[in-house]
Image (cartoon, helix red, strand yellow):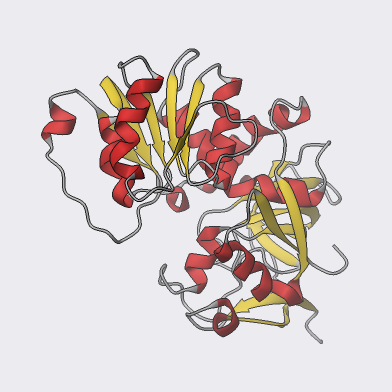
Amino acid sequence: METKQMEAVILKAAGSPDQALIHRDEPIPVPGPGEVLVEVHAAAVNPLDVANAAGWLGTPLPMIPGVDFAGVVVSGGEHEGWEAGQEVWGSGPNLGMKRPGTHARFVALPATWLSRKPANLTMAEAAAVGRSHLTAFETLINLMEVKSGEKLLITGGSGMVARAATAIARWRGAEPIIAARHRPEGVEHFIDTSAADGAVDLADAVLDSTDGRGADLALDTVGGALFEPALRSLRFGGRMVGIFSAPEPKISFSPAEIYNRQLRVTGLASVFLDGAYVAGVFDQLRPLFEREVLVAPAVRTWALAEGAEAYRAVMSGSGGVKQVLVPSGG
């Protein structure tokens, strides 16, 4: 019996998107026990996917990349609470790294990894929410426990995670202070880090914005040279979480910065979050989008055959637009 095929993006080597990715047919996956076959209607391309293609994550090759998805249940979920035709969304741990990912027309996923898609979002919009809002919600709500009235410093404020965090902070009644090279639309408190000495001036600028008190918390999406200034921007007893730090330049600072001011500093490695836990976060995000408390980012769609171009667009900076792959027929 002939195996049914699907189109997919394949990560075949480590390197630039043109070197690493090809578009070809692959067998449609067969869901195992407790798994569901999902027809992918849209799948975002994230910086994490670009890092995967570059070989930074040690993924065994060849592999179908992609972590975010929006689509429709096809089969395999009858005994797991899912029915054929239900619209789902989510972002799976180890997808595209240890198991085939979502940059294909079909993906097999554990049933516990699925969440019902917001009814008011298109498939492309739902896929675009994905990893950025998961990271923002986990850092601000579950790790930092942001409270109404708090002052929140967000570095790299033009990026997708920072934009999502800005919206979530406002929903919770916190006041975001955005530090970035470009001022996002609608931002009131902005610190320009594009100047050569921007990192040096960051702490002073935050103190000026908070009447000398310092920020209650900081979300550092950039790391590197901005780490120490962000740390010094915090008030006594402040808290900080980081999600990324470039390998260069290396930094050094005294632990006294943390100890003497009773700071709480942590990080988030979202790829290690449990899949069922992630689905629970998407369950919490869904009503926020359905009530339009949160809105999906702007989207540019690409065919799977244009996967390398979509990856290049993410590398070059998307300017607040999420790059989303749309399988033909999806």
At 76% from the left edge and 47% from the top edge, which residue is drawn? 125
Left or right: 166 in relation to 301: left
**Residue 215 showing in the rendered view:** no
Camera-side residue: 289 or 315? 315
Report which quarter residue 207 is drawn in.
top left
- State which quarter of the image contains the N terminus: bottom right
Residue 284 % position (x, y): 63, 30
At 30% from the left edge and 49% from the top edge, which residue is drawn? 225
At 59% from the left edge and 37% from the top edge, which residue is drawn? 164
At 29% from the left edge and 61% from the top edge, which residue is drawn? 248
Report which quarter residue 152 is drawn in.
top left
Task: Please determine whether, in this image, residue 186 is positioned above or below residue 70.
Answer: above
Left or right: 145 in relation to 245: right
Residue 194 % position (x, y): 44, 48
Residue 56 % position (x, y): 41, 69
Left or right: 164 in relation to 266: right
- State which quarter of the image contains the C terminus: bottom right
Left or right: 61 in relation to 80: left
**Residue 25 showing in the rendered view:** yes
How many numbered tags mark residues here? 0
Task: Please determine whether, in this image, residue 280 is positioned above or below residue 83.
Answer: above
Camera-side residue: 170 or 36? 170
